[in-house]
Amino acid sequence: MAASSSSQVFQEELKDAGERLLTPPASTPELLILLDKVELLLSRVEQAPSERTYDALLPVMKALIAPDLLRHSEIDVKVSVASCINEITRVTAPDAPYDDKQMQEIFEISVMALGKLSLASGRCYTKAVSILHNIAAVRSCLVMLDLEFDELIVEMFQLFLNTIRSDHPQSVFSDMEMIMSLVLEETEEIPLELIIPLLRSVKKGNQNISPTSWKLGENVLNKGADKLRPYLPPAVQFMGFDVGDFAEIVFSICQDASRSEHLNGLPISATGPSSSDDSQLKKASQTKGKRKRIPEKEEVPEMANGMENHGEELVGCQIKVWWPLDRRFYEGAISSFDPIEKKHKDQGNDLPSSNVLSDTKMDSADASSLPSPSYEVDAHNPLWNYVTIVEKKSDGGGNVTWQCNFCKVIKKGSYTRVRGHLLNSPSAGVRPCEKVTGKDVTTMRRLEDNKAKGRKKKTDSADASSVRSPSDELDTKNPSDEEDTKNPSNEVDTKNPFNEGDTSNPLWRYVTRLEKRRHGGGNVTWRCNFCNVVKKGSYTRVRGHLLNWQSAGVKPCEKVTHEDIATMQRLENEAVGRRK
């Protein structure tokens, strides 16, 4: 009797809280208190509740998906709502508590809330840890797979690898590892967008910069080795790196893949992927499945035996070079060979010797030279300038896979979705970028106005440089390369309004000016374009932050890789040479 009475009191309390939430208080502090109470009550509800408890739960379930709460302007409220809904998901598991459309919006705010794991502590951080644990415990990530929320899954992978750090509780690391491993295990066809973040996390150099991210990526790759075996070699080749540039587990998986397939009789070595990668890529992409998204290449003819060490003797030969972004061959001729760098040069473009062997074929007939593949700034659709093309459609259609240069999320769609993401247009059906500022939006809208007025492409490109973007021009190299996607550029930007043409201090271009001292002094308030930390000081502090100089009295950037540092040091050396 006592137990029944206690249960009845709890049900009444749960129902009352839900009814109060249907007409939420206008005050944010009061609303947060109510949401905390609701979450506490939900945490006491067991899975497969009684019919009476489920009936008491209905007002809460209805209230939490109301637009006023789900799309609340306050981040603290949205994170609390996400935490409450995750408790409901736990209660109803393995069934989803809402319809597919509602679940998409729920997962979107859940992934947004997981981003608060980057905080050191606080209300949002605590709730993000709880949300992460519930997703792992009830395997709600499988619902994301079933509903084909591919972009959100990719975003979640990127978020985990970017935010994990050594001072996180072990449970956070374990939950992330479990979710990522489970997704890879249950995915019918693993998309390239999931593999690239994993490979980047275990790239040599990252072990010292982000050791916890390295360990997470290594563990996930190790657990999913069997499933990843056919996908990893072509992914490494797509990124333009050698397997030796990554952790030992990558080399091991690729070597096993080569041994098991026996393609061409050529094992993959640390000197670079073999031509068998193309066959593996094609084989992997031919398997039908609702999750197939690995880009399918054209058939690459096998090279004749004994071609693997060609160097200077290839000069003058006609070649066809595979360009993964366009997914087509470009014809040309090898004009020179550098024996030190072991690179061939084709019409001004350096081609790694290993890539010539695996991605080119000899053509005895002369062919008209095609221009080097690149992505120009589109004056008619100028916002393409603020994303990086990852994969174009083979049929030439408008939908492409692209990566936002601000928040680094990878999405798929046409220019309309690019606009929706960058300009915060809900009607585009895409989640808006949280890294774009109001000033950025104003400038980008002005660019589109310029287009409408018929202004020329050069004017649009010049205006575009005033937006704080990690890249001032579209990447003409492989956009999956870590260096190309992270660095604002590999050249000094003399048009950057921040450095005002200062090519003698090129690292200014890697930070964004927030405020300059009125008397014209050297100290300014600036924000790092890599880690987004805001600091104040002169060029010396900028260099100390970016180049990891403890003597500069500033905390070094944790997001800068060894490749980034090498590029910035090269820019500084070039600046010294110009001064001489």
Image (cartoon, rainbow, N blue to C red):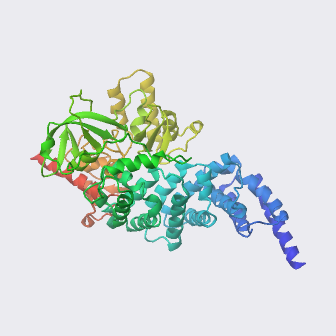
Tally the marks: 0
The answer to whether residue 157 is left or right of residue 557 is right
- Residue 100 x/y as whole percent: 67, 48
In the rendered view, tell whether residue 528 sits above or below residue 465.
below
Taking the view exactly as shown, the residue that stands out farthest to the bottom is: 2
- Residue 201 x/y as whole percent: 39, 60
In the rendered view, tell whether residue 361 sits above or below residue 125.
above
Query: Residue drawn at (42%, 41%), measured in percent from left and top?
Result: 391
497 or 89, which is in the foreground? 89
Taking the view exactly as shown, the residue that stands out farthest to the top is: 454
The answer to whether residue 62 is left or right of residue 455 is right
Residue 379 occupies which quadrant of the picture? Answer: top left
Visible residue check, residue 434 = yes
In the rendered view, tell whether residue 294 sits above or below residue 41.
above
22 or 189, which is in the foreground? 189
In the rendered view, tell whether residue 470 sits above or below residue 83.
above
Quadrant that contains the N terminus: bottom right
Query: Residue drawn at (36%, 45%), measured in percent from left and top?
Result: 479
The answer to whether residue 540 is left or right of residue 450 is left
Visible residue check, residue 485 = no
Residue 545 occupies which quadrant of the picture? Answer: bottom left
- Residue 280 x/y as whole percent: 39, 50
- Residue 552 x/y as whole percent: 26, 63
314 or 151, which is in the foreground? 314
Taking the view exactly as shown, the residue that stands out farthest to the left is: 580
The answer to whether residue 403 is left or right of residue 268 is right
